[in-house]
């Protein structure tokens, strides 16, 4: 089940919300939220829900064992528990990829091994990373283990963030699970954030996906114009697809009395790739920083050790996104850019005009998305050839023309305009005079929110929505 679907909006939510808010007891609300979260996951994954629930039970017991272990044994208990989670992820997500690559080597000797077809449980990367962060925080003493199974079950399986994040630390929501404040004001604010996220997904991401799909999937040899139009569309699609889901999850959290961290902060306004990773999928980048980069030594060692750590982390980040060499190359690409910036380019970027630094970061990001979107290595190289004009400059293929509806072009323009909004150095975007005036006029704001939800529902009802891109990770 996805947020931008008829079953969720017209069956799941209308049944869930009254049952949740009718109770004043936090414990009763937790039960309702937990039951509906399991139903939410089981809707599309009826058998894999057992995998998720099994992971919950194992990690609940493992955290208790870590907390009770003697100091000289605690590291071994934690290591075994983390390894078990990584094995679960490895079997379901990487086993077939590893065996396919082994067979390519064995083929030189006329040998092969059978490659089983292993289906990928929805959101396994996210609930595994939630579990690992929980275990490590308990080991470090920065979080207390959940004594009740239903508490840890709710933390891992809570449906707003279960299948596509953001990645939440247990210590962030531990108190809120037992005691939280739910008011009509918070519910209204959460609904507003949810509607904005839904519109980002349905009215922008799904619309520009027509262009990206036409160029990447239907044009054999994209011309210069086609390639840049396709990459531009995918750049907007992936941002508003994932930011939209994150906003919907955050909106639900606010309405239910929880506080989830912000996951995006205008990443396309960054002036370096280093800054980009402080603004894009922030819950994932901080996860890698806190649980891998810093334990590996971070930037405390020599320059070579720092560069090695950066490349290692981003190779793993690429592999986390998918069992494909394209994702590995994408991770290596970003890791190398970070090394180059740390080695000296970053200091140069601070001295040049802001627009030049911004152009470098944006183009570098867009080129990276080619690896992310392409099916395989030859497909990516074919797109790069188009981007430099090796397949000619134009005109555009008729299939691309057919994707350029007025609404699609409008979504692309609006998407770029919103992604490049003026920013401040603080966390929230700068509030200009128009924005402040708007927020103090409830009637136009209500009309705007109503229009967003109406057009979003109409779009969903027409059958034009698509699954969230990050569901496959």
Image: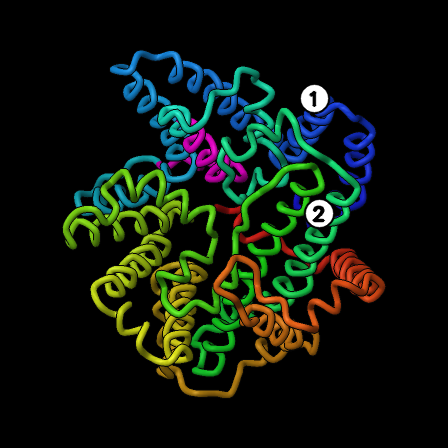
- In this view, the residue in front, 21 or 319, is 21
Is residue 127 within the magenta segment?
yes
Question: In the image, residue 314 lies at what x, y percent?
Answer: 32, 51
- Residue 406 shown left or right of residue 209 in the figure: right
* Numbered circle sitting on residue 190: 2
- In this view, the residue in front, 37 or 462, is 37
- In this view, the residue in front, 191 or 218, is 191
Which residue is located at x 47 percent, y 71 percent? 231
Taking the image as drawn, is residue 256 in sight? yes
> Residues under labels 1 and 2: Cα distance?
21 Å
Q: Which residue is mark 1?
A: 27
Is residue 263 within the magenta segment?
no
From the viewer's perspective, is residue 446 above or below residue 152? below
Question: In the image, residue 379 lies at what x, y percent?
Answer: 39, 65
Which residue is located at x 55 percent, y 72 percent? 422
Which residue is located at x 50 percent, y 41 percent? 167
Question: In the image, residue 170 lies at what x, y percent?
Answer: 50, 31
What stretch of residues is rendered in magenta? Answer: 115-135
- Residue 175 shown left or right of residue 346 in the figure: right
Q: Can you say which quadrant of the picture contains the N terminus? A: top right
């Amino acid at each position: 089940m996805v947020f931008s679907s008829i079953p969720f909006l017209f069956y799941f939510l209308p049944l869930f919300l009254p049952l949740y808010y009718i109770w004043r007891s936090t414990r009763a609300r937790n039960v309702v939220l937990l039951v509906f979260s399991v139903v939410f996951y089981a809707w599309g994954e009826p058998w894999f829900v057992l995998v998720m629930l099994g992971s919950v039970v194992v990690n609940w017991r493992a955290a208790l064992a870590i907390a009770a272990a003697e100091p000289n044994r605690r590291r071994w208990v934690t290591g075994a528990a983390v390894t078990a989670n990584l094995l679960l992820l490895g079997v379901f997500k990487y086993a077939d990829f590893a065996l396919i690559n082994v067979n390519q080597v064995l083929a030189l000797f006329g040998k092969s091994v059978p490659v089983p077809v292993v289906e990928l449980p929805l959101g396994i990367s996210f609930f595994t990373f939630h579990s690992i962060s929980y275990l490590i925080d308990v080991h470090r003493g920065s979080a207390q283990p959940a004594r009740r199974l239903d508490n840890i079950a709710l933390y891992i399986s809570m449906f707003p963030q279960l299948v596509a994040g953001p990645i939440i630390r247990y210590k962030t929501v531990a108190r809120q699970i037992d005691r939280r404040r739910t008011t009509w004001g918070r519910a209204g604010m959460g609904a507003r954030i949810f509607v904005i996220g839904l519109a980002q997904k349905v009215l922008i991401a799904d619309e520009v996906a027509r262009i990206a799909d036409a160029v990447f999937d239907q044009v054999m040899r994209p011309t210069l114009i086609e390639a840049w139009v396709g990459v531009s569309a995918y750049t907007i699609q992936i941002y508003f697809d994932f930011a939209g889901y994150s906003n919907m999850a955050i909106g639900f959290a606010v309405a239910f009395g929880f506080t989830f961290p912000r996951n995006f902060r205008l990443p396309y306004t960054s002036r370096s790739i280093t800054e980009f990773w402080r603004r894009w999928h922030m819950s994932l980048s901080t996860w890698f920083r806190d649980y891998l980069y810093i334990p590996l030594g971070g930037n405390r060692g020599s320059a070579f050790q720092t560069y090695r750590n950066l490349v290692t982390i981003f190779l793993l980040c690429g592999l986390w996104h998918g069992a494909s060499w394209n994702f590995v190359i994408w991770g290596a690409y970003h890791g190398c850019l970070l090394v180059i910036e740390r080695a000296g380019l970053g200091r140069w970027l601070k001295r040049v005009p802001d627009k030049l630094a911004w152009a470098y970061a944006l183009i570098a990001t867009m080129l990276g998305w080619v690896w992310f979107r392409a099916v395989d290595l030859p497909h990516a190289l074919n797109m790069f050839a188009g981007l430099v004009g090796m397949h000619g400059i134009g005109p555009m293929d008729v299939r691309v023309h057919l994707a350029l509806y007025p609404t699609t072009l409008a979504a692309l323009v609006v998407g770029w305009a919103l992604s490049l909004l003026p920013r401040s150095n603080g966390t929230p975007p700068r509030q200009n005079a128009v924005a402040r005036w708007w927020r103090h006029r409830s009637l136009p704001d209500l009309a705007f929110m109503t229009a967003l939800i109406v057009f979003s529902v109409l779009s969903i009802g027409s059958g034009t929505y698509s699954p969230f891109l990050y569901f496959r990770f």
